Amino acid sequence: MLEWSQVDATFIISTGRTGTRFLADKLSKYANHALVHHEPQPNLQKEAFEYYSQGKVDSDYCALFKMNRLNVLDELRSLGRSTYIESNGGITFMLPHICSLFKSCNVVHIVRDPRTWIPSAYSRTQIRDGKSELKYLRDSSWVVSPQNLENDPYRDRWQNMNLIERLSWIWEFKNRYVLDKVASNCETLMLRYEDVFEALDCDSKKKILEVCQVDLQVLSNEKILEDFNDKINQTSKFELDNYLNWAKEDVLKCDAIVTQLRNRFYS
């Protein structure tokens, strides 16, 4: 009977708003040898961040993952497959602790320029009481925040930070965690969103497909470019203007948080 120790796993992660749903949709068609899921429920972000802030050990994370992915293992067994691809930014805080569960474990992390990511995240909506509202206007929407992190410099400032500052912190914190923790414990491919979804060449696109063991011989460059141009779940209405049109105060507050890390990806 198949166990996780016999599974080749690939996790596609990000800060969200970076095309991970799109990738799962395409990979489910390309990767016929694998079981592909986008944000299985629970996506484990809340639980994983709580474990992180509480200093839990590897065995705690592994037990949490196995308990919440029992149905996935059952599905792999029923399909007779041993390759699993999960596209889920929520699982980021678990990855350094669960990679040893699998026969092999690869991570693809997609970074998006915060100057375009923040307006997209800012504009994300959800339905409450039959009405659409901006998701992050409610404190209950902030699953990840510095308030439970004892040594975070923004812990005591959080309540007075505006939405742009908070999203700047999220961008920096999550991407920094991947660089410092995930990449040092898991085989990690880091790609820029713009190179995957906006570049007119196939280099970064093929790197993702290769990690996911997709047979590139049956896919022409033209087909790959055509498919990757067919985006889903795009932000249709922006509630926050382009970075270049922000108030100077908001630009300065954002830059104070993200500039050092942003410059590692965007010169």
Image (tube, helix red, strand yellow):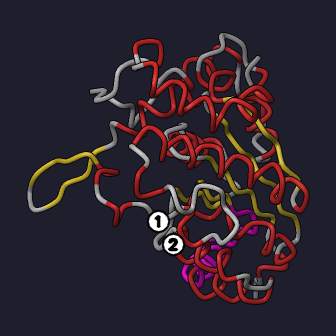
**Image coords of residue 212 (percent x, y):** 75, 47
Decide if residue 263 is on the left or right side of residue 162.
right
**Image coords of residue 184 (percent x, y):** 91, 57
Circle 2 packing at 10 Å, graded few (<14), some (14-19), many (20+), is some
Q: Quadrant of the N terminus?
A: bottom right
Q: How many marks can you see?
A: 2
Decide if residue 136 is on the left or right side of residue 50.
left
Predominant SS along the magenta part:
helix
Q: Secondary structure at mark 1?
A: loop
Residue 173 shows up from this direction: yes
Q: Which residue is mark 2?
A: 46
Disc 1 residue type (three-letter):
Val
- Please tell me which residue is depicted at 81% across the width and 67% down the height of the picture: 96
- Please tell me which residue is depicted at 61% across the width and 27% down the height of the picture: 113
Decide if residue 180 is on the left or right side of residue 77.
right
Q: Nearer the viewer, residue 46 or 199?
A: 46
Q: Is residue 254 above or below residue 37?
A: above
- Please tell me which residue is depicted at 63% across the width and 38% down the height of the picture: 257
Disc 1, disc 2: CB below 8 Å? yes
Residue 217 shows up from this direction: no
Q: Is residue 124 above or below residue 42?
A: above
Q: First in sequence, mark 1 or 2: give its number.
A: 2
Question: Residue 129 magenta-drawn?
Answer: no
Q: Which residue is mark 1?
A: 143
**Image coords of residue 39 (percent x, y):** 51, 60
- Please tell me which residue is depicted at 63% across the width and 41% down the height of the picture: 30
Q: Quadrant of residue 56?
A: bottom right
Question: Residue 74 magenta-drawn?
Answer: yes
Disc 2 residue type (three-letter):
Lys
* The residue stretch that appears in magenta: 69-84
